[in-house]
Image (cartoon, grey):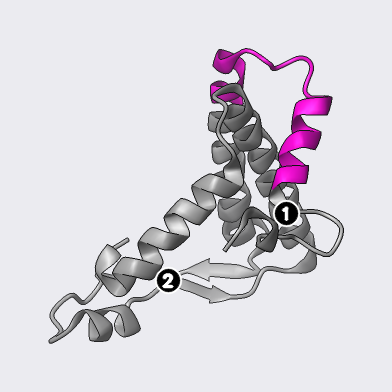
Amino acid sequence: MDRNTISIDNDINLDNFQTQVDDVLIRHRSILDIITKLDEYTSRINRAVIKSATYCGCIEVHATKQDYNKESLEEIKNNMENHIKGKLCPSCKDILLEEIGAYLFYLSALANTLDIKVSDAILNEYKNIKTLGIFSLK
């Protein structure tokens, strides 16, 4: 699998996105700025999910203890709960798309600063989870 197979649609792939980020990033080029922006957008994503439950109400969180007392990893995997009831409404989904997009922007900026290709990181992780499968235990 080469880098070009990871594409968002027919016109853009991850490498193109990462190049575009490098072209437009001006104010927050310092690694210190980038790291704090990543932290900020992690918080904004968390806040948007929480507001979907507490303000909008389109989703509900019903957290309970996970059941790890199964015979196999496959059974454990199939019985794990995400604790979400309902679906994001269009408004909440739009907000999360925006926040996740900004996070990906700054993740790409961090990768650029450290001379890492995001597509290489994704391919590396893909190979690991493909090889280990359910035994990657993530």
Q: Which residue is mark 2?
A: 83
- Can residue 1 be found in the magenta stretch? no
- Label 1 environment density (alpha carbons within 10 Å; few <14, some 14–19, many ≥20): some
Relative to the observer, which residue lies in front, 68 or 51?
Answer: 68
Residue 112 visible in the displayed image: yes
Q: Earlier in the sequence, mark 2 or mark 1?
A: 2
Q: Which residue is mark 1?
A: 97
Residue 81 locus on image (x, y percent) = 37, 75
| Point 83% across, 26% down: residue | 24
Marking on residue 63: none
Distance from disc 2 to disc 1, alpha carbons, whole Å, reads: 21 Å
What secondary structure is the stretch in magenta mostly built from? helix
Quadrant of the image for the C terminus? bottom left
Label 2 sits on a secondary structure element that is loop
Relative to the observer, which residue lies in front, 89 or 112?
Answer: 112
| Point 55% across, 33% down: residue | 116
Residue 60 locus on image (x, y percent) = 53, 69
